[in-house]
Each structure stands twice: as structure tokens, then as C-alpha cells.
């Protein structure tokens, strides 16, 4: 019954998209690169169109070679407006309060003349023109308490008193361990059909030092407050939390911002469907500033609230994401396992192969701040760019096609120590950020510079990249264009700092925590079916296995990440910023053999020590990894060590930030402090 109704809604939306496309075909983007984006975000009200029966034929794929490059200006996300300072109806502390909704809308991602794309994005609840993907930027100061009411408004008409839910834009695999409002919550399903019901969301601020209640745990999701939620559906995840009671279909989170100034970003984190919710558009920048950064004389300004039209910006965030499209402008994402390796079944529950999930996905087009291959007019002067790799699976290697370098001043957790690092290329795993200065002053008006991507169109296995794997130079090998325009005297010219503040190195006397990265295969076909984290002493563990990472409050620990797979994985810890200690080459197969013998032999004595399998000396962190990080590349055939201090009690996760991996078990809960007796995971006799 639910399937039938949702199908109808989806079909009506397709018709609505076509109608909108006809209406917007001649719509122009911003006239200058520094102008806020044109609002194209009126909530899409389902028109009273009588839908005819849907055909099974999907629209054709849009050939990325045919998408014109560098014809549309870059969108520079404006600042997200707040509701001012409030104490939440007398129930809480004074905080800068935001009411941020998730909605579905149309956006001109492809150049004008091509159809708009239906996306999801965040925006201010009371202002339809503030919805964009990636979202408007949240600006915060160190130690400013920020309260966000996160509203799930994935409904047909957010202004209606009786809204109907919208189904997902993309194919949801119900056989993963996922939010699962139908037969869960938060359990694996067995239905091979795509889920067409109401969509769960939960928001996470990546890189934030934040109490667990506001971290956006993957099982803390919630459905929209639609009037047609089917009977029996769970409307909230098993670990839903809200700092204050909010309206239905929402959660209230509070961010203390008690950390160094840095480039954070917010995105969806729903169990088993993060890859789809983020790919649909749920991401945005969150820039945290402090007095140390203020004292550096960096180029600016960045967008501010109330900027006059035509304001020039010299500090610009750049979210790079790969996407694929259909000819009708809609997002393409694989709807079957066959897309990945042509494995056509049998699937779960008859084998361990999920029917829809793909182990990785690489879009064939590059999008920056929500537009494919944009250009930016830049003056011959110094700029500050905040790069984010917001892709699902793609590692980026960014390089200019002209002799100009990156002066990196910051990474995930703020300023690099001691001095900027000059680099001719930037390696960025999914979720990593790089705060860089680029000096265009050697160029003349009229010069054109292309930012290239030399990373692979396939899983990254460490540097150097096999030339046969380097991104297609006609498409994903290009990112955006910089066009030199006349110098003006606007903004703060800034200067490259000669020094940056020192950072104290963390130290500990606790033993290394030995953790593993694992790939699980379906043996008859020898094909990957999921990825897992684990420990040296326990082997691979799924999300629902009891917690094994349990530092006490205030502990400083070294985590030694033992990569037992053939690919690199960007490993992200919630709550903390850490330091990269070193990477040591090791004999993976010999360690695995020793671990198997240990596990098969009943775990007698200590687990195998990966250091005994080292094949070389420890390699110090790369020059750009000397600061605070929240995401680290764990290369194959290496032991990657990080050190962190765990200072807030509560339940968090650590995971791979390849979203396809994260969604299918490459994520584990961890707990800081004594584990409460009532905290259960499914593996413990079905309790939760
Ligand atoms: Cu991974």
C-alpha cells in the first residue's frame, strides 16, 4: 500500500520537474561571481497533475563530455541567517539560534540551457530563498553557544498544515543495517525493493567538539512531521535525542564551539543512508573563527550577512563533489549492484550481497559549490580558499595547470603549526579540508588557470597514482577555472603569514589501541559485500557488536589503524581533533595469518602485535598533516597511528568517510567514560 502511494508521488514530481524545466530554461545565474546565488528554491508544491502510469524506462545518462565547462560563475554561499540570541523559551542558556530545515527544491547545477536538478538542501525555515546545496555557510565564533533547530521538511509543501512526505530521490537499499522505519528501527531488512517511504535525517557537524547529545548519532534520526506516515512506522531512531523539546520532525542541538578556529562542515549522518542523503545535497560549511586567526592579516572578506550586492570576496569556500546526471537533469546514482560489477544476484537474503548498494561510487562530473565546472573571476592578488572534498568515494589531487602553488595554512582542525606549507598539489580524501592561500599576482587580466584533478576515477590506493587510473582529463580531471580580471582596491589584501602558532604534541603512556580495517567478500564470487572496522584481538566487527573502544574521560590514546584492505580509507573520529603520529609499512598477509591463527586458536595470550610485522621504519606525517586532524588517510599496507585526547563523556562513532563504506558497516560506536549498563547493541541477545 505504501509502495503504491509513494510511487504516485514520485511520478507527479517527475512531471513537476519537467514543467519547472520548461519554465526555467532561460534563467540566468548570478552576473558576477561574488553575488549571492539567485534563489531558485521555492518549495516545490506538487501540482494537481494527473499522473499517468509510470513507465519502467529511466531517462538516459547525461554524457559529461557534452556539459559545457567554465560557462557558469561559481556560487559563493552566503551566510546562513540566524534567529538571533534566544534562551529557547526560557528553558536554556542564551545561544545564537538557527532554525534550519531540510527541503527538496530545484537547483541549476548544470549550465543554463540544461535542465535544473532536483536536490535536497538546508536553509532557514522562514526564508525559502535561503535554500541551496551546498547550504549557506554558518559563521560562528569560538566559545559562542550555537543552538540549531534541525527540521526534517522532506514533504510536498512545508507551509501546509497537512504535508505529505516525499520519498527519497535515490534508491535506498533496505537490506543494509539502516535507519529502517519499516521493520526496524535501525535493523537490517530483507526486502530487495527500494524503500519509498518517508525519509529519515540526522545532522552532524563534522569536526566539532560537541557533547554527545548534539553529535548527530546515526541512530538519532527522525522522520518529517507528515500526516501520511504509514501506521506502524518508527518516526525516530533508537537513539533520538534533543537538547530541548522541539516540534515534531525536528531535533534541537547545541554547539559549544570550544575549539580552535577552523573549517567545519555539516552534513547528514543517517544510519545506512548517509551516502544517499549527502549525494542528494545535504552538506554545508560551518566556519569557526577566533582571535588568533583574526590577528593573521589573511585576505578577505568572506561573505557576511547584509553584504551589498556586488561585494567582492577574497576568502571563498570551495566544496568539491562528484556527481552524475540523467539527461533530464536529475541526479544519477546506481540503482543496482550490477552497476558496480555486473553481479546480478542472488542477493540478500539468499546470499550476503546487497541488491542495490555499491561498494564505491565515482560520479562522472565535478561540481563546485553546487555547479558543474564553474569559473571564478579572480584579481591578480592573494586569495584564501577553504577546500572541502565533499565527495562520497573520490579522493582528489588538486593541481593548477599553470605554475602557481598552494600555501596551506590550515587543515581539518585549524591552523597548521609553525609556518604555512607550500605545495604544488593537494591530496584530499573525502571529508578532508585544506585552508590555503593562492597568490594570483603574477598573472595578467585575461589569463586563465584551470584547477585540475589528478586523483583516480577509482578507489585510491596511496601515492603515486597509477597513470592508468588518473581522472579523465576531459571531465573529472578538471575542477574549475580561474579567470584573471582587473585589480580593484576592495577588501583586505592580506599577506602570507611567515609564522603560525606552535602546537603542543600530545603524549601518552597508555598502550596503542590496535584497530583493523577489513573488507568482507562473498566467497563463491569473491566480490566485496561490506567493509568493517575491528580490533587486532577480535577481528572484524559489525556496528552492532558491543563497544570495544572505551577510553575514560581525559585519556589520551594512540590508535594504531591496521589496514587489511587493498585501498586507502579516510578514517574519521567524532568528538576529537587528533594528531597524526606516523605510518609504518607492514606485511599485511603475514599479520592476517597470525591474527587468524590467534582467533581460531581461541585467543590464547596477547593478540598479534602489528609492530612485529613492520617492513620498514615509521614514516612521519606529511608536511600538510602536522596540525590537528579529524580525518586521516589510512593507506593500504601501512599502520597509521593517530593520537587524541577524549575529554567528553558519551557515545560517539568513528568510521570510514567513504560514504558507501560508512553506510555498510565501516563504522563503530565508541564510548568515552564508563559504559552505562543500559547501553546495548543488537548483538547482545537482541537487545538495543
Ligand atoms: Cu573505507
Image: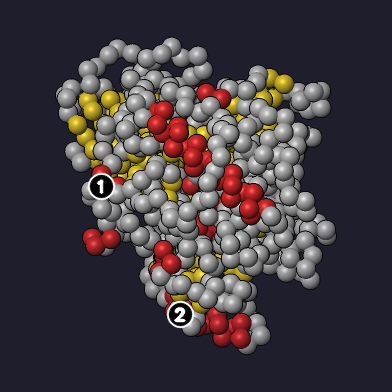
Q: Residues within 10 Å of mark 2 (few under 14, many from 20)?
A: few
* Image coordinates for residue 115, horizontal then vertical, percent: 38, 37
Q: Position of residue 475 (x, y in %)?
A: 27, 47
> Residue 283, can we see it?
no
Among the 4 quarters of the image, the one containing residue 95: top right
Q: Residue at x 78, y 68 (%)?
A: 686
Are circles 1 and 2 on residues that touch, CB within 8 Å?
no
Which numbered dot is residue 16? Answer: none
In front of the other: 246 or 511: 246
Instruction: Name the residue nearer the viewer: 489 or 99.
Output: 99
- The numbered disc on residue 65 is 1
Could you tell me residue 46's position as x and y percent? 58, 35
Tag 1, which secondary structure? helix
Return the residue nearer the eye: 553 or 546: 546
Hey, which quadrant is residue 688 in on the image?
A: bottom right
When the figure is inspected, residue 114 is found, relative to residue 338, above or below; the finding is above
Where is mark 2, residue-wise?
525
Query: Real-space Cα distance between discs 1 and 2?
Result: 34 Å
Q: Foreground mark, 1 or 2?
A: 1
The residue lying at 72 percent from left, 21 percent from top is: 86
Name the quarter where the N terminus is drawn.
bottom right
What SS does tag 2 mark? loop
Amino acid at each position: 500500500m505504501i509502495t503504491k502511494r509513494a510511487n504516485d508521488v514520485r511520478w507527479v514530481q517527475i512531471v513537476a520537474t519537467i514543467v519547472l524545466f520548461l519554465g526555467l530554461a532561460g534563467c540566468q545565474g548570478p552576473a558576477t561571481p561574488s553575488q549571492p546565488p539567485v534563489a531558485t528554491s521555492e518549495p516545490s508544491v506538487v501540482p494537481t497533475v494527473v499522473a499517468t502510469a509510470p513507465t519502467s524506462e529511466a531517462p538516459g545518462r547525461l554524457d559529461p563530455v557534452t556539459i559545457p565547462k567554465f560557462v557558469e560563475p561559481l556560487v559563493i554561499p552566503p551566510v546562513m541567517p540566524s534567529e538571533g540570541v534566544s534562551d529557547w523559551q526560557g528553558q536554556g542558556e542564551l545561544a545564537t539560534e538557527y532554525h534550519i530545515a531540510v527541503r527538496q527544491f530545484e537547483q541549476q547545477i548544470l549550465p543554463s540551457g540544461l535542465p535544473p536538478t532536483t536536490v535536497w538542501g538546508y536553509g532557514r525555515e522562514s526564508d525559502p530563498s535561503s535554500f541551496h546545496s551546498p547550504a549557506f555557510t554558518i559563521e560562528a565564533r569560538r566559545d559562542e553557544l550555537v543552538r540549531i533547530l534541525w527540521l526534517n521538511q522532506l514533504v510536498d509543501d512545508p507551509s501546509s498544515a497537512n504535508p505529505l512526505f516525499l520519498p527519497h530521490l535515490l534508491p535506498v537499499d533496505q537490506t543494509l543495517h539502516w535507519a529502517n522505519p519499516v521493520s526496524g528501527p535501525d535493523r537490517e531488512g530483507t526486502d530487495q525493493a527500494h524503500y519509498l517511504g518517508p525519509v529519515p535525517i540526522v545532522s552532524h557537524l563534522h569536526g566539532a567538539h560537541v557533547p554527545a547529545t548534539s553529535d548527530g548519532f546515526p541512530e538519532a534520526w527522525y522522520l518529517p512531521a507528515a500526516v501520511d506516515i504509514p501506521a506502524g512506522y518508527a518516526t525516530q531512531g533508537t537513539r533520538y535525542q534533543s537538547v530541548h523539546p522541539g516540534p515534531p520532525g525536528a531535533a534541537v542541538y547545541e554547539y559549544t564551539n570550544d575549539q580552535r578556529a577552523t573549517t567545519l562542515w555539516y552534513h547528514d549522518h543517517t544510519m545506512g543512508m548517509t551516502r544517499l542523503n549527502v549525494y542528494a545535497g545535504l552538506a554545508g560549511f560551518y566556519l569557526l573563527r577566533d582571535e588568533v586567526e583574526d590577528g593573521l592579516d589573511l585576505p578577505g572578506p568572506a561573505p557576511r550577512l547584509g553584504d551589498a550586492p556586488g561585494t567582492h570576496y577574497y576568502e571563498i569556500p570551495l566544496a568539491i563533489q562528484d556527481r552524475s546526471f540523467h539527461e533530464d537533469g536529475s541526479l544519477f546514482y546506481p540503482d543496482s549492484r550490477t552497476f558496480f560489477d555486473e553481479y546480478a544476484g542472488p542477493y540478500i537474503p539468499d546470499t550476503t550481497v546487497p541488491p542495490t548498494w555499491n561498494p564505491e561510487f565515482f560520479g562522472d562530473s565535478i561540481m563546485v559549490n553546487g555547479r558543474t565546472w564553474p569559473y571564478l573571476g579572480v584579481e591578480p592578488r592573494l586569495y584564501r580558499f577553504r577546500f572541502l572534498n565533499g565527495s562520497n568515494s573520490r579522493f582528489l589531487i588538486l593541481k593548477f595547470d599553470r605554475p602557481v602553488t598552494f600555501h596551506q595554512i590550515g587543515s581539518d582542525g585549524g591552523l597548521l603549526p609553525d609556518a604555512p606549507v607550500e605545495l604544488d598539489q593537494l591530496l584530499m580524501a573525502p571529508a578532508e579540508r585544506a585552508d590555503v592561500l593562492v597568490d594570483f599576482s603574477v598573472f595578467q587580466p585575461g589569463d586563465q588557470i584551470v584547477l585540475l584533478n589528478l586523483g583516480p576515477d577509482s578507489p585510491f590506493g596511496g601515492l603515486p597514482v597509477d597513470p592508468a587510473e588518473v581522472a579523465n582529463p576531459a571531465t573529472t580531471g578538471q575542477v574549475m577555472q580561474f579567470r584573471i580580471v582587473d585589480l580593484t582596491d576592495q577588501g583586505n589584501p592580506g599577506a602570507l603569514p611567515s609564522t603560525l602558532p606552535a602546537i603542543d604534541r600530545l603524549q601518552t603512556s597508555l598502550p596503542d589501541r590496535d584497530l583493523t580495517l577489513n573488507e568482507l567478500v562473498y566467497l563463491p564470487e569473491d566480490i566485496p559485500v561490506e567493509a568493517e572496522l575491528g580490533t587486532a584481538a577480535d577481528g572484524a566487527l559489525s556496528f552492532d557488536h558491543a563497544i570495544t573502544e572505551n577510553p575514560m574521560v581525559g585519556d589520551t590514546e594512540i590508535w594504531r589503524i591496521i589496514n587489511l584492505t587493498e585501498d586507502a580509507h579516510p578514517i574519521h573520529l567524532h568528538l576529537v581533533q587528533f594528531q597524526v603520529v606516523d605510518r609504518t609499512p607492514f606485511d599485511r598477509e603475514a599479520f592476517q595469518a597470525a591474527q587468524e591463527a590467534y582467533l581460531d586458536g581461541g585467543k590464547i595470550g596477547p593478540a598479534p602485535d602489528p609492530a612485529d610485522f613492520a617492513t620498514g621504519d615509521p614514516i612521519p606525517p606529511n608536511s600538510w598533516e602536522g596540525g590537528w586532524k579529524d580525518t586521516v588517510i589510512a593507506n593500504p599496507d601501512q599502520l597509521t597511528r593517530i593520537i587524541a585526547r577524549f575529554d567528553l563523556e558519551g557515545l560517539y562513532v568513528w568510521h570510514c568517510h567513504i560514504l558507501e563504506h560508512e553506510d555498510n558497516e565501516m563504522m563503530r560506536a565508541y564510548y568515552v567514560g564508563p559504559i552505562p549498563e543500559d547501553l546495548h547493541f543488537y548483538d547482545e541477545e537482541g537487545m538495543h
